[in-house]
Amino acid sequence: MDGIINSEIIIIILAAGIRLATPYLLAALGEMFVQRSGVYNLGVEGIMMMGAFAGFYATLQLGSPLLGIAVSLVVGALMGLLMALVSVTFKAEQGISGIGLYMFGWGLSGLLFRLYVGGITSVEGLKAVKIPLLSTIPFLGPVLFDHNGLVYTAFILVPVTGFILFKTSWGLNVRAVGNKPEAADTLGVSVVLIRYQCLIVGGMLAALAGAFLTIGQANMYADNITAGRGFIAIALVYFGRWSPWGILLGSLLFSLADSFQSMVQVLGINFPYELAVILPYMVTIIALAISYGRVWSPAALGKPFQRGTRG
Amino acid sequence: MKKRVLTLLLAALTLLALSGCGTKPTAQSTPTPAPEAPKVEKIRIALVLPATVDDLAWGQSMVEGLKAVQKTMGEDKVEVAISEKLGNAVDAGSAIRQYATQGYDIIFAHGSQYQSVLTEIIKDFPKTTFAYGTGFATHPNVFAYDPQAQEGGYLLGMLAAMMTKSGIVGIVGPVESGDAVKYNYGVQQGVIAGKADVKSRISYTGSFNDIVGAGNMAKTHMSAGADIITGSSQQAVGALRAVAETEGKYWLSTDMDQSNIAPNHVLAAQVYNWEKIVGKIIELRKTGTLGGQHLTLSLADGTIVLKYNEKLADKIPAEAKAAVEKAKQDIISGKLKVELPKK
C-alpha cells in the first residue's frame, strides 16, 4: 500500500465526486418536475443517450460545445414531447411507455451514430473554467471552483429549481397537478399543459445530462454511453423525496461513494474490487430501502388524468 | 403505483449493482444475412460481437482480421456476416443459432461469455464449426482461441517502467476476468522487470463498455500520480481519451493499435493478428477438422505483434527499446516465460 489518505487525496476525491454528480443531478432535477406533475418517465436513460449523441454530433459538426448543448436541449425537448404525447394525450401506461422511450432512444442514437459518424471520433469538449478568486481558496477552491460550465449549471439549478417549484405560481400549479389534478382542473389549471411542460423540461435536462457525458466528460461518443446513469437518476428522485436539496444530497452521496471507491482501488488499498464497484449502488439501495414507507410522494403519480373522473 | 415503480427501480438498481453497471437485457439483435444456397467453394463465416464493429478494440480487431482473410482469399470465396451489440449471452445465443440454421460454415462467437450458450447450441449442428474466445474448453466442432495477452502486456509493462517519470503506471481494467486479467498480470510483471522501483496500480471499472467510467478511472490514476496508463476492452478508449487530454501522459494499447485517435499519446500497442487464426480455422475445416483445438495467439507465431507508434519513436530511449526487443526475443524463444495468475 503506497498512498496515505492525505488532504491532497481528499481534494481529488471530492472534486471528482462533484464532477461525477453532475449528470445525475441534471437528469434527476428534470425527472423531479416530471414526477411532481404526476407522470413518471422511465425513459430518462433513452433521452440521455439521444442528448449525448446530439450534443456530440453538433459539437463535431459545428465545432462549438455550446452549440452542442443547444442542439441537445432541442432534441431533449422533442423526446420529452414524445413522452408527453404518448403518456399524457394517449394516456398510455407510463411505465411501459417510459421503457419504450428508453429503447427507442438507445436504438436511434446508436443508429444515427453509425449512419453519420461511423467510428470512434473525439471532439473538443467543454473546458474547465476556474472561477477567479474563489478557485484560489485553499481546499475548497480546487474542489468546488475548477470545473466546466455544466457542472456549475447543475449545482446552480438546485436552488433555482427549488425556487421555481416552491415559490412561483407555475411551481404551485405543477405540485397541484401532481397531487390533486381534479382540483387543479376545477380551478382552471390545465393539467395536460402543465404535464407537457414538465415532460419537456425533464427531457431537456436529461438530454443535458447526456451531453455532459459526451462533451463534458468523455469528449467522444460510443454506443450505450450512459451505461445505466439514467436509471440511477430516477432512483435519486425517490431518494431525494422529490425535492432539489434531497436530490443534491443523493447525487453527492452516490458520486462521492463512486470517486472514493475509484481512489481506494487506484491506491491499491486491499479491498475486493467487486465490492468497491458496487459501493455506490449499495449505498443508494440501502438509503432508498430505509426511506421507503415514510416518504410522501405526489398523490397522482402514475395516473393519467381524465377529466370527470377521480384519478 | 408508487410501490410498483419503487420495486421496479430497486430491481433495476440491484441488477446494475450486480452486473457492475452497464449491461442491459435488451441488446439489439440484427442478424440479416442473405439466405442464399451454399456453393461448394464459398466459405460462409458469421461473427457475433458483444460490442460494436468499430469499438477500436476487441471487436474491431476481429472484424479487420475477417476482412483481411476475405481480401486474401477473394470476396467471392468468403462471405462474412456480422451481428453486433450482443453483450447479452442469451440474445447472442439466438443469433448464433440463426446463423447455424442458415448454413453458415464457421461461426465466431467473439467473447468468453459465449462459452456456455455455445455448449447448448453445438449439439444441434454437428457439421458447423464454432469458435469462441477467450477460452480453452473445446468440443469436436468447437475451436477455442486464446490470446496470450500477458506476453504483449509484459513488453508494454517493461516499456512503461523504463519511461515513467513519476514511477507509477496505472492500469484501467474492465471486469476482473479472462483476457483483462492475463493482460494486467503481464503488465505488472513487465513493470517489475523494467525497473524495480516503479509501481503498477490496477483498478477495475466493473464494466466493459462504460467509456465515461473508464475515463474517470484514468483521471483518478493520473491525479494520483500515474503518467503512463494502459487498459483493455472496448471501454479503454474512454481512458485513452482522458490520457490524451493531459500533457505529458502516455497510453499503451492492447487488442489493436489505437494510435490513430491519439497519435501524440499512444506509445505502443499489442496487436492481435486474427487473420492468421481465422485462416488456420478455415484450413483445418477444409481438411476435415471441425473443431477440438485450443488455438493460442502468441508472439512466437506472429499472431500477437508489438507495434510502436512511429510518431513517438523518438520519445522512446534506445536502451528501453533494446531491452523490450530482447525480452520479446526471449519470450519467442521460450527463454522467458510470462507467468499467468494462479487460479
Image: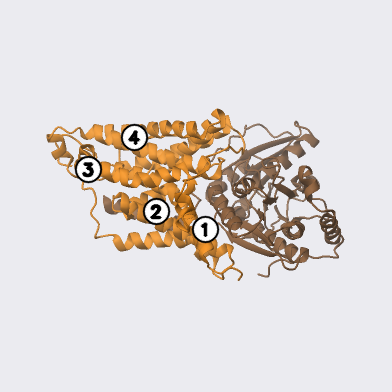
Chain colours: A orange, B brown
Is B118 placed left or right of B311 in the picture? left
> Dividing the picture into quarters, in which one does residue B197 lie?
bottom right
Please state, as top left, top right, bottom left or bottom right, where the C terminus of chain B lies in the image. bottom right
Which of the numbered marks, if any, corresponds to residue A200? 4
How far apart are labels 4 and 2 at the CA level?
22 Å
Crowdedness near tag 2: few (<14), some (14–19) or many (≥20) residues, C-alpha within 10 Å: many
Is A183 placed left or right of B103 in the picture? left
On the image, numbered disc 3 is attached to which residue? A167
Task: Confirm whether circles 2 and 1 share one chain.
Answer: yes
Is A108 placed left or right of B118 in the picture? left
Mark sitting earlier along the chain (2/1): 1
Mark sitting earlier along the chain (4/2): 4
Q: Position of residue B335 (x, y in %)?
A: 86, 65
Instruction: Report whether residue B176 is seen.
Output: no
Mark sitting earlier along the chain (3/2): 3
On the image, numbered disc 2 is attached to which residue? A251
Crowdedness near tag 4: few (<14), some (14–19) or many (≥20) residues, C-alpha within 10 Å: many
Q: Position of residue A289 (x, y in %)?
A: 33, 61
Which residue is more in the foreground, B108 or A269? A269
Q: Residue furthest front?
A: A133
On the image, numbered disc 1 is attached to which residue? A12
Mark sitting earlier along the chain (3/1): 1
Q: Which callout, 3 or 2, points to the residue nearer the camera?
A: 3
> Dividing the picture into quarters, in which one does residue A156 lie?
top left
